[in-house]
Amino acid sequence: KTLQAMLTTVLQRFPVERVVLVADRGLLSLDNIDILTTLADQSGRKLEFILAVPTRRYGELLETFRDLAIDEAGLSEAAFAGHRLIVAHDPLRAAEQSEKRRARIAELEVMAERMVGKLDAQDAGQSDRGRRASDRGAYSRFTRAVAEAELTRFLRADFTADRFSWSLDEAAIAEAELFDGKLALLTNAPDLTPAEAVARYKALADIERGFRVLKSDIEIAPVHHRLPERIRAHALICFLALVLYRVMRMRLKAKGHTASPRTALDMLARIQRHRARIGERTVNGLSVTTPQQMELFDTLNLPKPV
């Protein structure tokens, strides 16, 4: 209902001919898709969406992903829930995710093997100091460690066995690796290419980054004002600060500089101008600047202080 009310308000207040809603995984559900579809094409205007699909939540995507043909750009397109399903694949990220999962599973298996070795040695009369180990205790420690690692889909303790044992589900691991490095998007926009849809979704992260900057570096809140015009002025100043922040980031990125806007501002804030009076004489001077600070002025296309 909140989503529907929000979109209805946007359509009523703003005379735009086409609205494209871009949202992250938390917004997607089949009910939300139905709401968006119902609101589409109202008053002769277009309401379209690009939504990230929480792929592991939809088992029916498994066969679709198995049959995907990824092109040279790492993109593919299929159909899901009556809409376009666009998939972007990053092989490097996929390899990292798979290797990380395999490494965590291997660590847990080593832990389980050590517990088995301790139990076997104890049965053979080679008890260590301290509390005696038990199969029940091994089950408890192992299942807790697996749950904390969020790997219960792949490692399972065999509670029906007489002695502590576990099993590894290779099929579940293969299914998980099928989704590694993939971004799945659902859209009803007919004219967007897969690359355009992915670019628009990734721009969402840029917008969210702007909100984080407003809250942290620029500190838009709390607002210590009561009068509406002062509240608007405060918001305007913060917005202009965000624009300058974004310009700084664009210039730093364009020149290949590794510093972030926050780091650049901290470095430049160390430059100080001093004024000293000696009798009737006034002396002005600039603090000693570093090569890194001077490089930032060139990168940001700003005049150097003199």
Image (spheres, rainbow, N blue to C red):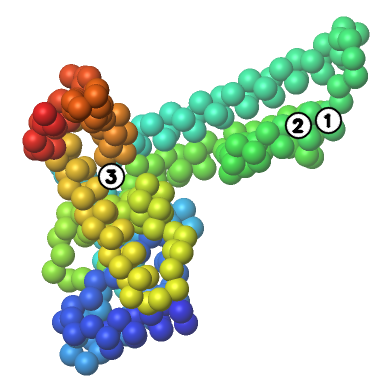
- Picture residue at 36% right of the left edge, 54% below the top: 214
Q: Amino acid at mark 3?
A: His
Q: Amino acid at mark 1?
A: Gly
Left/right of residue 33 with respect to residue 167 in the rendered view: left
Q: Amino acid at mark 2?
A: Arg
**Mark identifier at residue 89:** 3
Q: Quick one: SS at disc 3?
A: strand
- Picture residue at 79% right of the left edge, 40% below the top: 160
Q: Quick one: SS at disc 2?
A: helix
Q: Position of residue 227 (x, y in %)?
A: 40, 76
Q: Quadrant of residue 111?
A: top right
For the residue pair 23 and 227, the one nearer the viewer reads as 227
Label 1, label 2: how many angstroms apart (C-alpha)?
Answer: 6 Å
> Which residue is disc 1 drawn over?
137
- Picture residue at 34% right of the left edge, 64% below the top: 234
> Which residue is disc 2 drawn over?
141
Mark 1 and mark 2 in contact? Answer it, CB < 8 Å: yes
Q: Position of residue 306 (x, y in %)?
A: 11, 29
